[in-house]
Structure formats: structure tokens, C-alpha cells
């Protein structure tokens, strides 16, 4: 029995290093959500971006937000919105912390949660 516990602990330790920092859940109706750690050193990636256009001549101003996620094993997700609340929220996005976004059946972003954090590394 002692050997089995050792093997299980070893497998769990290896699995923790090979799992993605990003999780994507796709529902049967094509809605879903993605969440993950904003850390370029981890497997997978998750981000949101904002695009703005200034009104000139006959063109209107616009603000667009899109979010994307890749889990490192082939699954990906994407959503898009012109909701000004998302554009405002994304201003708080940093390079560290966590991000969660949800999308509707039409692929429009429907919710976002941003958790910013800092990383403390002791001096060598």
C-alpha cells in the first residue's frame, strides 16, 4: 500500500506541472466561459483587448472588446462585444492576476471578472 501512495503522490505532482493555467468550458448551446491566470510563463493563454475609434467626418466613434483563451491542448474560445461597461472594466486588466469571461450562444461576451494581484519574489 505504501508504494501505491507514493505513485499517486508522484503522479499528482507531475500533473500539477503539466496542467494548463487556463480552463475553457463550452456548453452544448455554444455558450461558455473561460478562466485562467494572466501569466505568460504558464501553459495556455487568456486575454482581453480593447479597440477604440474616434469620430471624424461621417464616421462614428466606436469601442470594441474581444476576449480569447487557449488552454494549451487545442481548445480555444473567443467572444466580442461593443458594450461600454466591458471597455471600462478592461482598463483595470494587468499582466498578473486572474481573468474570467463568459460568452452567450451568439459569441457575444456576457460577463467578465478581473482579479489583479502582485507577485512577491524574495531577493536572492
Image (cartoon, rainbow, N blue to C red):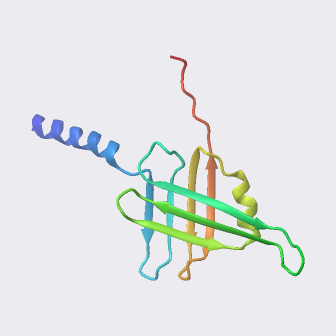
Instruction: Pick the residue in front: 45 or 51.
Output: 51
Q: Residue at x 32, y 46 (%)?
A: 18
Indicate the position of residue 71 as horizontal and vertical percent values. Answer: 41, 58
In the rendered image, the vertical position of residue 30 relative to residue 67, given as above or below: below
Indicate the position of residue 85 as horizontal and vertical percent values. Answer: 75, 67
Q: Residue at x 49, y 61 (%)?
A: 69
Task: Specify the quadrant that holds the N terminus.
Answer: top left
Q: Residue at x 12, y 34 (%)?
A: 2
Instruction: Pick the residue in front: 86 or 11.
Output: 86
Residue closest to the far top: 124
Q: Residue at x 43, y 67 (%)?
A: 25
Residue closest to the far right: 57
Q: How many marks?
A: 0
Indicate the position of residue 17 as horizontal and vertical percent values. Answer: 34, 42
In the rendered image, the vertical position of residue 123 relative to residue 83, given as above or below: above
In the rendered image, the vertical position of residue 20 relative to residue 49, given as above or below: above
Indicate the position of residue 121 as horizontal and vertical percent values. Answer: 54, 26
Q: Is residue 83 left or right of residue 67?
A: right
- Which image quadrant for residue 65? bottom right
Q: Is residue 79 left or right of residue 75?
A: right
Amino acid at each position: 500500500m505504501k508504494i501505491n501512495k507514493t505513485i499517486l503522490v508522484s503522479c499528482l505532482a507531475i500533473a500539477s506541472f503539466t496542467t494548463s493555467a487556463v480552463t475553457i468550458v463550452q456548453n452544448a448551446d455554444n455558450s461558455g466561459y473561460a478562466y485562467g491566470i494572466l501569466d505568460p510563463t504558464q501553459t495556455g493563454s487568456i486575454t482581453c483587448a480593447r479597440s477604440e475609434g474616434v469620430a471624424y467626418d461621417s464616421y462614428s466613434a466606436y469601442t470594441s472588446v474581444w476576449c480569447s483563451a487557449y488552454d494549451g491542448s487545442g481548445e480555444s474560445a473567443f467572444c466580442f462585444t461593443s458594450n461600454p461597461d466591458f471597455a471600462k472594466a478592461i482598463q483595470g486588466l494587468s499582466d498578473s492576476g486572474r481573468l474570467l469571461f463568459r460568452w452567450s450562444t451568439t459569441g457575444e461576451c456576457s460577463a467578465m471578472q478581473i482579479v489583479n494581484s502582485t507577485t512577491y519574489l524574495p531577493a536572492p
